[in-house]
Image (spheres, rainbow, N blue to C red):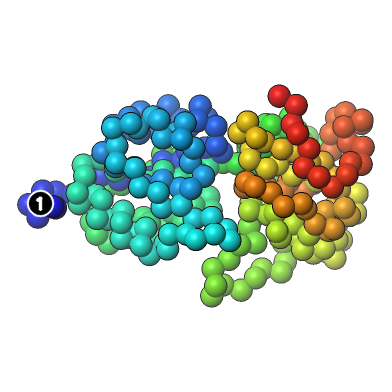
């Protein structure tokens, strides 16, 4: 039972990173080891949760196409947890401040007068680029990068025009990738623009697909994990043999 005379605890929004447990920041791991309660995303692995064996763990995951926890309920649960525990961690995949619904959660904490701190994490785009071994920027080729998603709330209009940047990185892009390719071709991008698709970036089951924009418009095969689509001339492989056209299937990554 909550003590009405006890001041609320502090909430830490921590980025878990792209998936691999050892890619969380040192600060994030230290705070997990001190947490009384951890509200975590569905994509957070059991290896990551091993950093906080002492904490009460609450799964508030949201997965596309599956039964998910409503954001309004997560906000309320976060506030209630801070009134019950002294150290509360909201553990989010990637970085909390990028497609992490942090704005709603921080607003809820502010309204409740609860102190918080944000601990950044490695976002999936950087992990995916590292996995492929191809930078998102390249001298003389690409000097701008845009992260975007086609996933919108029910009351939000779809953004038909895509960002005008040298390199585009589409989060949660598996089902929307074909439409993205069609729109980019309509906006004048070359059909031969390199594309790299990474599923489950940084995890043992990571898979990689190399293709071009023309092939991407045919769609991608079904994936079991989060898919990130990287598009742009900077993604051209330095190895000509690797960049040769390959079938549309997610390929096992050499590890």
Q: Secondary structure at mark 1?
A: loop
Residue at image position (33%, 31%) is 53
- Measuring from the top left, give residue 166's x and y in whole percent: 76, 48
What is the number of callouts on the image? 1
Which quadrant of the rendered structure holds the C terminus? top right
Q: Residue 179: percent from the left, percent from the top?
A: 77, 63
- Residue sitting nearer the eye, 231 or 82: 82
Can residue 147 be seen here? The reply is: no
Which residue appears at 41% of the width and 35% of the height?
49
Residue nearest the observer in this picture, 42 or 81: 42
Relative side of 38 to 44, left or right = left
In the rendered image, the residue lying farthest to the left is 5
116 horizontally vs 238: left or right: left
Location of residue 80 by image quarter = bottom left
Query: Going 24% across and 59% down the picture, which residue do you hit?
Result: 112
The picture quadrant where one finds residue 243 is top right
- Crowd band around label 1 with a 10 angstrom C-alpha radius: few (<14), some (14–19), many (20+): few
Instruction: Name the residue tied to disc 1.
Output: 3
């Amino acid at each position: 039972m909550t003590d009405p005379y006890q001041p609320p605890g502090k909430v830490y929004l921590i980025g878990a990173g792209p998936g691999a447990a050892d890619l969380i920041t040192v600060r994030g791991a230290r705070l997990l080891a001190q947490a009384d309660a951890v509200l975590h995303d569905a994509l957070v692995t059991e290896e990551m949760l091993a950093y906080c064996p002492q904490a009460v763990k609450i799964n508030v995951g949201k997965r596309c196409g599956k039964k998910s926890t409503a954001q309004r309920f997560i906000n309320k649960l976060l506030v209630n947890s801070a009134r019950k525990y002294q150290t509360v961690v909201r553990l989010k995949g990637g970085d909390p401040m990028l497609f992490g619904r942090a704005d709603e959660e921080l607003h809820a904490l502010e309204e409740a007068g609860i102190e918080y701190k944000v601990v950044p994490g490695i976002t999936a785009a950087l992990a995916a680029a590292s996995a492929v071994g191809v930078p998102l920027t390249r001298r003389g080729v690409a000097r701008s990068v845009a992260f975007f998603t086609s996933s919108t709330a029910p009351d939000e209009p779809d953004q038909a025009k895509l960002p005008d940047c040298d390199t585009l990185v589409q989060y949660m892009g598996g089902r929307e990738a074909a439409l993205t390719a069609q729109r980019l071709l309509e906006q004048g991008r070359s059909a031969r623009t390199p594309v790299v698709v990474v599923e489950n970036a940084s995890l043992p089951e990571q898979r990689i697909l190399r293709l071009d924009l023309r092939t991407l418009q045919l769609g991608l095969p079904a994936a079991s994990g989060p898919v990130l689509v990287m598009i742009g001339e900077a993604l051209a492989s330095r190895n000509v043999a690797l960049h040769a056209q390959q079938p549309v299937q997610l390929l096992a990554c050499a590890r």
